[in-house]
Image: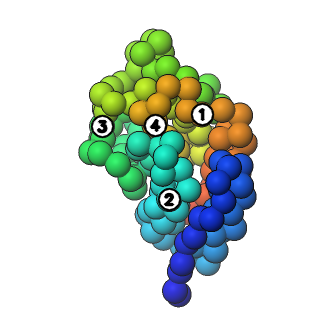
């Protein structure tokens, strides 16, 4: 299948509206989880190129988050449940927006340039399969618009997760 991803809009909401159908087309009919997560990170990085300094997935493997496909600098490979923003999002089973990571107790500094972060858990029947983590080198970069659309994207991905995963 040939794919072409394009972002033309200027507002963040419009960019999400453009990228969601493109992500849907990329993952539709593809059974490989890593391929789907990799294409999603690439498409999201294009859509959030000015906001996201790092964007990727951590997968829940035996009650530990393990680095999955991402775009950006090298990252922490393993994160304990309950540790940092990612581990906290897993325990709370909810999206967490952190406007200033220096004020988040226990924040993990994988990238010293990270200033703000949003983490969206990938939930299936109340089980956390992993998280979508987006960092920015800009303070206060994420808001409810990001939460809304990233949660929609997370829901799309949960649909294509193999049933045997967690």
Which residue is tagged 2? 46
CA gap, disc 2 to disc 1?
16 Å
Give 43 or 6, whichever is nearer the viewer.
6
Cα distance, mark 4 to mark 2? 14 Å
Give the secondary structure at mark 3. Answer: loop
Q: Residues within 10 Å of mark 4 (few under 14, many from 20)?
A: many
Contact, mark 4 vs mark 1 (Cβ under 8 Å): no
Earlier sequence position, callout 1 versus callout 3: 3
According to the picture, the residue beneath numbered tag 3 turns out to be 76
Question: Which numbered tag is attached to residue 92?
Answer: none
Measure the alpha-carbon separation of dots 1 and 3: 21 Å
**Sequence-first disc among 3 and 2:** 2
Q: Kindly identify which numbered label has been placed on residue 135.
A: 4
Instruction: Pick out the residue farthest to the front.
Output: 10
Q: Left or right: 151 with respect to 32?
A: right
- Left or right: where does residue 130 sit relative to residue 29? left
SS assignment at label 2 = helix
The x, y position of residue 132, in whole percent, is 52, 44
* Residue 124 in view in this figure: no
Mark 3 and mark 2: Cα distance apart in space: 22 Å
Element carrying mark 1:
loop
Q: Is residue 83 above or below residue 29?
A: above
**Residue shown at 59%/40% (left/top)?**
121
Of 149 and 65, which appears nearest the observer? Answer: 149
Please say if 89 is above or below 61. above
Point out the frontmost of discs 4 and 3.
4
Q: Residue at x 50, y 59 (%)?
A: 46
Residue linked to disc 1: 142
Q: Dot 2 surroundings within 10 Å: few (below 14), some, or many (20 or more)? A: some
Which of labels 4 and 2 is toward the front?
2
């Amino acid at each position: 299948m040939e794919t072409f991803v394009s972002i033309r809009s200027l507002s963040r909401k419009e960019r999400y509206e453009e990228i969601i159908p493109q992500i849907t087309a990329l993952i539709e009919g593809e059974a490989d989880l890593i391929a789907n997560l990799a294409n999603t990170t690439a498409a999201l990085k294009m859509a959030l190129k000015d906001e996201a300094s790092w964007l990727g997935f951590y997968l829940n493997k035996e009650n530990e988050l393990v680095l999955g496909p991402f775009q950006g600098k090298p990252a922490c490979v393993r994160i304990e449940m309950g540790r940092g923003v990612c581990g906290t999002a897993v325990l709370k089973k909810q999206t967490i927006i952190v406007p200033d990571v220096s004020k988040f107790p226990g924040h993990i500094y994988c990238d010293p340039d990270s200033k703000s972060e949003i983490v969206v858990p990938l939930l299936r029947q109340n089980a956390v399969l992993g998280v979508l983590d987006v960092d920015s080198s800009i303070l206060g970069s994420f808001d409810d618009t990001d939460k809304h659309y990233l949660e929609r994207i997370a829901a799309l991905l949960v649909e294509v997760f193999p049933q045997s995963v967690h």
